[in-house]
Amino acid sequence: MRIHTLDLRFQNIPGLIASFLVESAGEYALIETGPGSTLETLRAAVRVVGVDEAAIKKVFVTHIHLDHAGAAGWFAQQGATVYCHPNATRHLIDPSKLIDSARMVYGTQMDTLWGDMLPAPAERVVALQDNERVPLGEVEVIAWDTPGHARHHHAFVIGDICFAGDVAGMRLEHSRYLSVTAAPPQFDTSAYVQSLDRLLAANFKTLYLTHFGAVDDVAWHLATYRQRVTEVYERVAAGYREGISVEENRQRYATAEHEIAMAAGVNEELWRKGEDANVTSMCADGVRLYCEKGR
């Protein structure tokens, strides 16, 4: 088996969003497609590693957020089968609600940031249950239900390797700063911790993060990230009980995360790069929404 990490150069910035091309015994699968805005970059990257994009017959998306699955419909329209969480199928088949919600958030920047999300033909979308297996050449891709970042989130496991989507967070340029992916509306601390405990117990050799790339110090990463998830929740929950405003919550979140990143050796350039992939204001809103629901 061979794994190619494809840099989608989101907004012309390297190292923010990855797609993974997996090859086994002459079969090819794509894990994550990135947004529609980087589709042409993805197609070119596939060709650069010597693969005809028409040979990609299986596409796996961890969840249907635009930075992970925005281009899935295009591949489905070319004849690939897209595998996803059962709660994600309807959004791949008809992405109109997803697009409308995103447009409300991003406004005039929507098209530049995310591009088109094409509908996938219903017959080309397959929902996978927890632990369901899909053959790929000489290996199997196993779906793991891993909520926390989103209720419709899968990690995909091949042997001792895990493609973690957003459930293991963001870690750019192998830094020691782990940014909690907590954008609304489905952040859930309890579910997040349970998913991370499941990943920790598996003793994976390598994690592949959509943001960004291969992680080899898996035990440290997952244990530290588990602490980070709890930490951001407790911080935001304290502010919520204090009665601070939404804007004050965002400011406190950004300030605290900036301090943690700097202490971990991140420079200002890398911090700004991280903001392009995992905006602290959105994460603050995601954790606050969880608190508002009375969790």
Image (cartoon, rainbow, N blue to C red):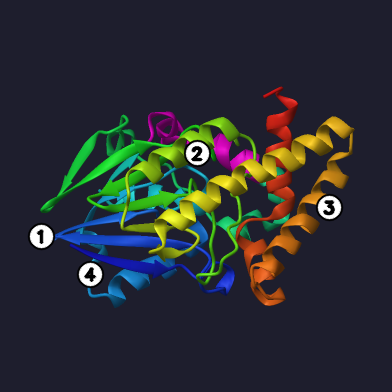
Three-letter code for the amino acid on which mark 4 is drawn: Val
Q: Is residue 26 left or right of residue 70?
A: left
Please report whichever mark, 3 or 4, sits nearer to the chain's N-terminal start. Answer: 4
Q: Main secondary structure of the magenta part?
A: helix
Q: Which mark is residue 176?
A: none
Q: Nearer the viewer, mark 4 or mark 2?
A: 4
Q: CA distance from mark 1 to mark 3?
A: 51 Å
The residue tagged 4 is 51
Q: Is residue 93 magenta?
A: yes
Which region shows up in magenta? Answer: 85-102
Query: Label 2 crowding class (10 Å Cα cut-off): few <14, some 14-19, many 20+?
Result: many
Q: Is residue 193 left or right of residue 273?
A: left
Say whether marks 4 and 1 touch (CB < 8 Å).
no
The residue tagged 2 is 95
The residue tagged with tag 1: helix, strand or loop?
loop
Say whether marks 3 and 4 touch (CB < 8 Å).
no
Query: Label 1 crowding class (10 Å Cα cut-off): few <14, some 14-19, many 20+?
Result: few
Is residue 92 placed above or below 172 in the rendered structure?
above
Picture quadrant where residue 134 is located: top left
Please report whichever mark, 2 or 3, sits nearer to the chain's N-terminal start. Answer: 2
Q: CA distance from mark 3 to mark 4?
A: 46 Å
The residue tagged 1 is 25
Q: Nearer the viewer, mark 1 or mark 3?
A: 3
Percent position of residue 220, x then y:
47, 57
Q: Could you tell me which residue is drawn at 54 percent across and 67 percent down?
A: 172
Q: Is residue 282 left or right of residue 200?
A: right
Percent position of residue 45, x then y:
36, 72
